[in-house]
Amino acid sequence: MPFLGKKSCMPRSRSPKPHKMVHTILLIQPTVRADSRTWSDYESTTDCLEGICKIYEEFLKKQNPSMASITYDVSHLYEFIDKLSDLSCLILNTETCQYVPHNKDWIKEKIFVMLRTQARND
């Protein structure tokens, strides 16, 4: 017998959570070569955005192996993102149980907001 009621793709929680945890898939294609495509998944969009920053930080460490610590301006992170052949996020919409795609510009905007919030909290 088919299910006729409203189906939820997310388990219901008895207590509200302060930060919404939404499954996010990061799709990365560093070069034009199709075999450079890869993906990662995260429990939240914030975790995904932090993951993108960590990818850039690892790139900087490989470029500057003798440096003890790495610092960078957000504009350099944006340049790195822009140089990637493709970068996008698929974020689960818990109402429709479908993933919503977001492009590089959306990602850069959300990273800016995240970093600004982190700077204010420090």
Image (cartoon, grey):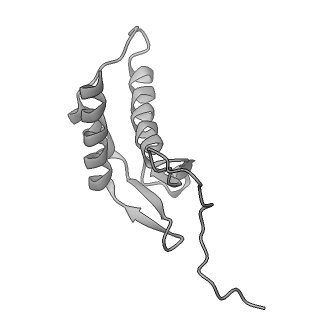
Provide residue 60's location: percent of width, then percent of height: 38, 25
- Is 14 situated left or right of 89 in this image? right
Quadrant (top left, top right, bottom left, bottom right) of the N terminus: bottom right
Quadrant (top left, top right, bottom left, bottom right) of the C terminus: top left
- Is 1 situated left or right of 106 in this image? right
Residue drawn at (38%, 10%) of the image: 67
The residue positioned farthest toward the front in the image shown: 14
Provide residue 12's location: percent of width, then percent of height: 60, 61
Provide residue 118's location: percent of width, then percent of height: 31, 30
Q: Is residue 97 above or below residue 17?
A: below
Provide residue 81's location: percent of width, then percent of height: 32, 44
Q: Is residue 32 above or below residue 51?
A: below
The residue positioned farthest toward the bottom in the image shown: 1
- Is 116 situated left or right of 36 in this image? left
Q: Quadrant of residue 55?
A: top left
Residue drawn at (40%, 27%) of the image: 57
| Nearer-the-camera pick, 6 or 76 | 6
| Nearer-the-camera pick, 122 or 70 | 122
Residue drawn at (39%, 55%) of the image: 86
